[in-house]
Amino acid sequence: MAVTRARLLLVLAAVLGLSAARRHEIHSSASELRVRRDTAELYIRVFADDLAASVAAHVRAPTPEDSSVGLDALDAYVRSRTRVQSGPGSAWRFTRCGVARLGEAYRLCYRAVGVSLATALQVRFTLLMDRHADQVNILRLEAAGRRRTVILTAARPSATVALR
């Protein structure tokens, strides 16, 4: 799905600029996947209450009132909802490189080392789709000198992104 830069900026401004109270009407995440040489970094920005509820449900625990997340449970959840590969059987293994709580949001960082690029990447990113049927995950990809943006939903949770 082609997205104009202006439209993307409007959506990102709405997603990232909201000062969300405990309830918000937009169920979305904004993420960037940057690939440099043989290393990929995935940055995810997501509402804290939604993430905490999904992580807790994933490990069958109660949702903390303060929207906190355990790091091991967070890692298990993110890995179960994220898959990037550049060819058959070559799924990238992400490890956590940072977690920051920014008020009502989290900024997460995950890194994969030893990745290889083909002419396209297959991306599956279903973060929070287990919680909200209308979840929208915006993923901006920067690799091989190219920038692409994909919008993933429950109806389209994965995409093949051409790099050339």
Image: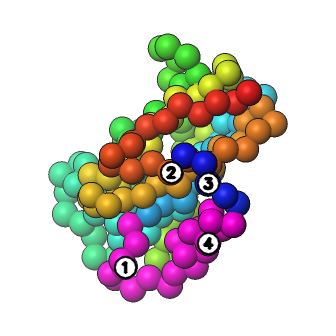
Q: Earlier in the sequence, mark 3 or mark 4?
A: 3
Give above or below for 152 relative to 133: above
Q: Dot 1 surroundings within 10 Å: few (below 14), some, or many (20 or more)?
A: few
Q: Earlier in the sequence, mark 2 or mark 3?
A: 3
Residue indicated by mark 2: 151
Q: Which residues are magenta?
A: 6-27
- Identified by mark 4, the residue type is Leu
What residue lies at 24% left-to-right and 66% top-to-bottom?
Answer: 63
Give above or below for 116 relative to 31: above
- Residue 146 x/y as whole percent: 76, 39
Locate residue 141: give its quadrant.
top right
- Residue 109 x/y as whole percent: 59, 51
What residue lies at 50% left-to-right and 51% top-to-bottom?
Answer: 151
Locate residue 3: give its quadrant.
bottom right
Q: Dot 4 surroundings within 10 Å: few (below 14), some, or many (20 or more)?
A: few
- Residue 105 x/y as whole percent: 49, 71
Q: Earlier in the sequence, mark 1 or mark 4?
A: 4
Residue indicated by mark 4: 10
- Residue 154 x/y as whole percent: 33, 48
Q: Dot 3 surroundings within 10 Å: few (below 14), some, or many (20 or more)?
A: few
Give above or below for 163 relative to 109: above
Residue indicated by mark 3: 3
In this picture, residue 120 sits left or right of residue 80? right
Q: At numbered mark 2, what does the secondary structure look like: helix, strand or loop?
A: strand
What residue lies at 69% left-to-right and 66% top-to-bottom?
Answer: 6
- Identified by mark 3, the residue type is Val
